[in-house]
Amino acid sequence: MMERRLRVTAVFLFALLVVVAVVALGYVRGWYIKKYEPQELASFLAPFFQVNRPKGNGPFPTVVAFHGCGGVDLGTLDWMSYLNSHGYVTVIVDSSKPRGLSRDQVCSGRRFWGSERAGDVLVASIEISKLPFVDENRLVLIGWSHGAWAIMDLLAMNPPIELPTNLHDSVAHVPIGVKGIVLLYPFCGFPAKAREGQFETDIPVLMLLAEKDPMATECLKFASIPGKRGDSVITHIYPEANHAFDMREEDLAGTGVRPHRKSMVDARRRVVKFLANVLELQKTN
């Protein structure tokens, strides 16, 4: 009798393990994620674009921004104001608000992985490149933490070779007008696709990391590998800074980390210099 019970228990545990594995695989593969046609997703996101532009008719060089897991923070708005003052159109793509996602849902990893948000990065950058005051040949993508993860996943997928999990139709590559990418303290742990050795791009990348952020070491592992990505990725580490060092105190309430002004000021300087170089601007104001 005891032996029979043990066999039944073993079979039950094995079956349970199989179910858990299938569910986990389905989540990684995006089987349970709502999928859109590219234009349908663009139309879903567009009402939540936060656009700011310099005076004049343009077209202007443009920065397309992807916020961290907490949504559009005050620090993100500060960055946009700063870049506006240097002559750039800025567009924040709010991925959380249209979906009704909370900080806890996204930051905990329970909802909305980078492989899903990569679709937002792709269709939003294409949609924004069509705006009449945007110079479609001078675009830069910038992402913080979760937003940087989404950008990296998109590069790793290299659509239409592999599609983001929220798209079910083939769609073009990242617009050829994207001349640079800025990644601030990206998430580089599991299940980031860059860990699979696919993060290769000819687009110049500036990656700004914080030494006190546990992800910094993980990001450096693949950012420094020789080859396309090794040649195109510029990294800088701030030794006194932690994750979200460039955000405001109000943004970081309850997180246990604090902003680091010296690192934030240097990060802004580096980003403006990088933008001027990749967009071949004559001055950085």
Image (cartoon, rainbow, N blue to C red):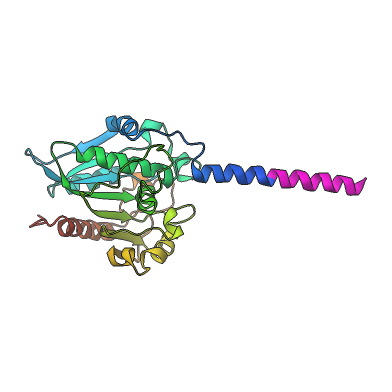
In the image, residue 253 above or below residue 33: below
- Please identify the quadrant where the N terminus is shown: top right
- The mark tally for this picture is 0
Tell me the quarter of the picture where residue 280 sits.
Answer: bottom left
Q: Position of residue 57 (x, y in %)?
A: 7, 38
> Can you see residue 73?
no
Q: Is residue 262 magenta?
A: no
Q: Residue at x 25, y 46 (%)?
A: 175
In this rendering, position of residue 230 left or right of residue 270? right
In this rendering, position of residue 29 left or right of residue 237? right
Q: Nearer the viewer, residue 17 or 148?
A: 17
Q: Residue at x 33, y 44 (%)?
A: 67
In the image, residue 70 above or below residue 155: above
Q: Residue furthest bottom?
A: 226
* Span highlighted in magenta in the image: 1-16
Q: Is residue 12 magenta?
A: yes
Tell me the quarter of the picture where residue 284 sits.
Answer: bottom left
